[in-house]
Image (cartoon, rainbow, N blue to C red):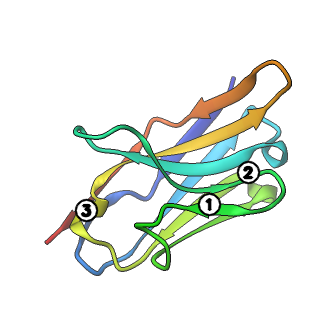
Amino acid sequence: QVQLVESGGGLVQTGGSLRLSCVASGISFRAFDMGWFRQTPEKQRDLVARFNSGGTINYAETVKGRFTISRDDAKNTVYLQMNNLKPEDTAVYYCNAYRGRVLYADDYWGQGTQVTVSS
């Protein structure tokens, strides 16, 4: 059974920092592209940051220079360090594990963790 368990969300003031963690189980962690997405009630789920196959990293333009994604394959964990947080970063943040295959893809999601940035 695949599980992605996020933690580290909470309430923070503008300019503050949070570190999200996502522990994966039930998958071959090293084989997956791990990433973070976020969603508000008004918007679709959008990419925040993600490791791609080949070792590159994609960041949303709105978080470049403020957020850093990292992973520890020995701990099956992916992190999102969020600095200089802004009210517009308020959202539910979801961990994602993705592996493309020839005919289909393995695509798993965590339950989400709420991040609220007060102004």
Residue at image position (23%, 76%) is: 14
Q: Residues within 10 Å of mark 1 (few under 14, many from 20)?
A: some
Label 2 residue SS = loop
Q: How far apart, in angstroms, are the residues tagged by discs 2 and 3?
A: 29 Å
The residue that label 1 is drawn on is 58
Q: Say above or below: 23 vs 83.
A: above
The residue that label 3 is drawn on is 88
Quick one: label 2 or label 3, which is nearer the N terminus?
A: 2
Whole-percent x, y for residue 15 in the image:
28, 81
- Residue 74 found in image quarter: bottom right
Q: Amino acid at mark 2?
A: Asn
Residue at image position (22%, 39%) is: 42
- Say whether marks 1 and 2 touch (CB < 8 Å): no
Q: Say above or below: 16 vs 87.
A: below
- Residue 2 found in image quarter: top right
- Say whether marks 1 and 3 touch (CB < 8 Å): no
Q: Amino acid at mark 1?
A: Asn
Quick one: label 1 or label 2, which is nearer the N terminus?
A: 1
Whole-percent x, y for residue 33 in the image:
72, 47
Label 3 residue SS = helix
The residue that label 2 is drawn on is 76
